[in-house]
Amino acid sequence: MKVEEHIGGVPPLPGKTDGVKQYSDMKNMVIVGLGMTGIAFLEKMLNNDTAQEYFYTVIGEEPYLAYNRVGLTEYFEHKNFDKLLLSPKTFYEERNKNRWNFKVDEAVVEVDRDHKVAKTSKGNSYDYDTLVFATGSNGVLPLHLLPDPVNGQSKQDYRNYREMGCFVYRTIDDLNSMLSFSEELSIPKDSTKRAIVVGGGLLGLEAGKALLDMKTFDNVTVVHRSKWLLSQQMDEKGGALLTEKVRDLGVTARTGTTVDELLFDSNGKLKAVKYNDGEIEECQLLCYTIGIQPRDEVAAESGLVCSKRGGVAINNFMQTSDPNIYAIGECASWNDKTFGLIAPGITMADILSFNLIQSKFHSPKEFSEPDIGTRLKLMGVEVASFGDYFADKNGPKWLPKGYTLKKVRSLVYEDPIEGIYTKLILTQDGKYLLGGILVGNTKQFTKFTSIAKQRKPLPCPASEFILGKGGDDEDADMLSDDTQVCSCQNISKGTLVENIRNGKCASLGELKSVTKAGTSCGGCEPTMKAIFESEMKKMGKQLSNALCAHFKQSRADLFSIIMVKQYKSFKEIMQNVGLKPEAAGCEICKPTIGSILSTLYNRHILDSDVHGLQETNDRYLGNIQRNGTYSVIPRMSAGEITPEKLIAIGNIAQKYDLYTKITGAQRVDLFGALKQDLPKIWEELYEHGFESGQGYGKSLRNVKSCVGSTWCRYGIGDSVGLALRLEERYKGIRSPHKMKGGVSGCVRDCAEFHSKDFGLCAVQNGFNVYVGGNGGMKPAHAQLLKSDVPPDQVIPLLDRYLMFYFRTADRLQRTARWLENLEGGIEYLRDVVVFDKLGICKELEDQMNELVGHYFDEWRESVIRKEDQIFKQFANTDKSQETVEIIRERGQRRPADWPEKETVEKKDFKNIKWSSTSWRSVCPSTELPEKEAGSSTTILISDTQIALFRLNGKLYASQNMCGHKRAFVLSQGIISTDENDNVYISCPLHKRNYVIDADKPNAGACKNDDSLSVALFDIKEDDGMILVKLPPEDELDEVLGTTKWKVKKSETVSEGIATFKKLDAKFNIKVPVRTPVPSVGGSELDW
């Protein structure tokens, strides 16, 4: 998806993505070498090059697919080449042929830089725009000790010395040749069949182990010029312990020794070696592991600058003297240094793959002095070195700021019984770990390496690592996600965790196969195992609770059932899923299922079969206020509004005399709208470009923003542009609870993203995405879901997060509480929506796309439908009644406060005895239609409001006033039934539930407040009219008249205002007062 430049780097809403690029549109990249570094680089490019900028051709000289050279020794155990493959054969066979190709058994012999063509040994030519050398290195043979090969063969081709008995240890062919040679070798009976390895470093010990495993030699000897084996990684004590262990395995270790001469028989076969001390020792096979020679000959012949010591010269960006050619791995020379380990090569591949794709958007990465620490199991002995492991010998390469004394101290633990040697090199004060050496027990290698790399003070005295925890396994949870676990493949803990949590790896073997960690030297496998087991333990199931008396399922379970079964109505759901198929539902399950149906199908909530399911706010598309009026909040996406719209909303508020206030959601709220005026107000707002802000619904309220980079000198990103698009995308969607978003243009967080259900903060590399924040009575700080998200990936990520929340949250559960209760918390959420652990990310995105594609403005749709009868105050008259006295404060009208103490004597309304009653026709039956979820309306008889209800063909009538706050709102509540089939109405203000079935023993009682009750009336239907049995009007008004129960200013004038007036006087506060507009008029009281 392309980012539109004209909107400041803010992505458009998701749409169709471009298809696969044609080959002709792509640049050509030739990778010379299909070894460990070459294949790693190819895989990284294929993953990073999402725009398909390059077509890749990788050319390998060997007749094999890329294999693990570090694991050559294990080959003798199974002799199965496929087990050495770094990527399975299917990686090559099922490749996208429009993106890459490979060649084996074909060497690049010439690079024509002028025409940008790579030519091969088979006569093929490959054009390139970019070429990468990953040719590796050769083993070194002391040619001055060797005779010329027979038949005039090349002295530079080491394969020509194999038949003499002289080998190097580099390739699978080297091993197979050694194996064949040893099996065919025949010697006199009185001779010793001996193999000698010259060079006691990492490779030499591997070769020694391989020869030992052949079991064809009487003796295997390792010759090393230093006083101890592995002298490039071990100090003398560690090396001596290793040497002792190698000897215990049956290998002869000759240290402090060199081979000065090779002796051959008359057939040109090796028969003996002569050491520097003059001793001659019988030998039939000699394997040299004395170093490497970078494969730079083709590069040198093409005119590229090469190091005098060998290797293609590169800069910090892997670039050679030709800006279109790069070199990585053992063939590259950086600062006149070559590295014969796989880890630096993988790091080079990482850096180059990043720079080739991302440097046009980001600062390029640079190569620096690599960590050449190692962790191996050599001949069954665990050995490791990490950090600056020779700091005590050569002086520290780094010291903390302020440390001027270049001295270090070593903490050493030796156990000759168990064969364990641990050496930690510390700063002089012991506060920083610089490096170390481990022999016999390397379980804490990853922890030590991480601490040394972080260059932070130790969390505890260094002695605790050895004495207190030296024998313990690593605590995987203590390792940070950026801890390097596999140094060979440069794999971090975070990468391992990601692949465990996303479900790709259900076993340690699969984890190794997918990530390549542990597939080279295998030294990191214990740590991998600890991480794997730790993460697997964290995975569990989420518990659910029954929704209400009608459904045993949780909301999340109901959501899934309704979604899969495609149920479209409450009745259908109750019949198929409910505990009582004929039940009418309650104030809990009705709005919950109404919300689910809206989330899945986005139907208009005023549709007759779902209207009765809605809470009062949704039912009338506005927020009910304590005097029965409603507030109107038009949408102002991202808080942005033009002067013209601001004037228009002011004129509308003025016309209807609405209390006006700026909300915390950067919108204008208009309070005090009469229910019957709502359609007219909406129509006028629509004419000026406004639509519903859905401040009434369990849906997105707003996405708050600061001005960001468009105006602010500190802004990094266009927060307004992104916030506006997020609000436009998610507007109208019903959710388990209300949602709020925020986008800040920098870390100063003026949009308060930390307190939002989803919040974004602009950073240099995109946006950090936070989720699960909340203000309110139980604040929660949003948690980081993903950092550095590019603008065009923000929406897909939020689509997944929100849709997963919609599916799995409980009823009326904000994202903060949902995340707190989610098994596994933010890590599990990250697994699902970032790492796709459940494999549903695309499904979540598709579902959101489908949902937002059906958006419509609910206000506008209601006006078009002309459903004014829903919004009438009374079904039998056009009169209107005020139920709370209106006062003016600071120039605006508002309802008088509820009295702190009741001034009107409460009545036991359910037991009222009337002097007489008679049937009275009150309204047409059409005012109380038969609807699936029930219907209701209000009638005015003299000064008394009566609420009428219809549910499942039966009629009910009660007073309209809830005695709790003397609010005339019962007809706007949800008609419900309980487990005992009692029909009750739930007050929309504070959920007082009144039984309205006159046939029940507790008729008129309040189910959750014994002090309250309602009067009930007989009701019937006859000849298209609704009839109610009522007492005389004066008697009815005396008990239930609105004038009697209306909340008046005189009941509330004492405390509140008096307190404020005292404050004003004490602190000389001048409270601004708006002068009433003459056209508004009104005789309301003014405080």
Image: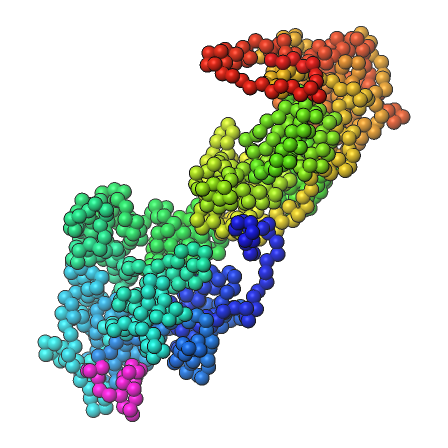
Measuring from the top left, give residue 396's x and y in whole percent: 20, 54
Q: How is the image coloured?
A: rainbow
Whether residue 953 sits left or right of residue 703 in the image: it is: right
Question: Where is residue 52 shown, x and y percent of the image?
Answer: 52, 64
Which span is picked out in magenta? Answer: 143-162
Q: Give the camera-side residue of 952 and 680.
A: 680
In the displayed image of the protein, which residue is found farthest to the right? 1023
Apparent side of residue 899 relative to residue 377 in the rendered image (left or right): right
Q: Is residue 994 visible?
A: no
> In which quadrant will I find the C terminus?
top right
Residue 414 visible within the image: yes
Question: Within the magenta stretch, is there residue 153?
Answer: yes
Residue in the picture at 38% in, 80% down: 109
Taking the image as shown, residue 521 lies to the left or right of residue 407, namely right
**Picture quarter with the N terminus:** bottom right
Q: Quadrant of residue 673?
A: top right
The image quadrant that residue 395 belongs to is bottom left
Q: Residue at x 55, y 45 (%)?
A: 721
- Say if 441 sits above or below 821 in the image: below
Depth check: 740 or 891 in front?
891
Q: What is the tally of numbered marks visible in this picture?
A: 0
The residue positioned 34% from the left and 74% from the top of the image is 304
* Along the viewing direction, whichever of 805 and 118 lies nearer the viewer: 118
Q: Position of residue 293 (x, y in %)?
A: 28, 74
Where 665 sits versus 505, above or below?
Answer: above
In the image, residue 460 lies at what x, y percent?
Answer: 25, 42
502 w.r.t. 634: above or below: below
Q: Residue at x 73, y 38 (%)?
A: 861
Kindly indicate the quadrant of the structure image that contains residue 1074.
top right
In the rendered image, residue 302 lying in the magenta stretch gets the answer no
Q: Does residue 551 appear left or right of residue 85 in this picture?
A: right
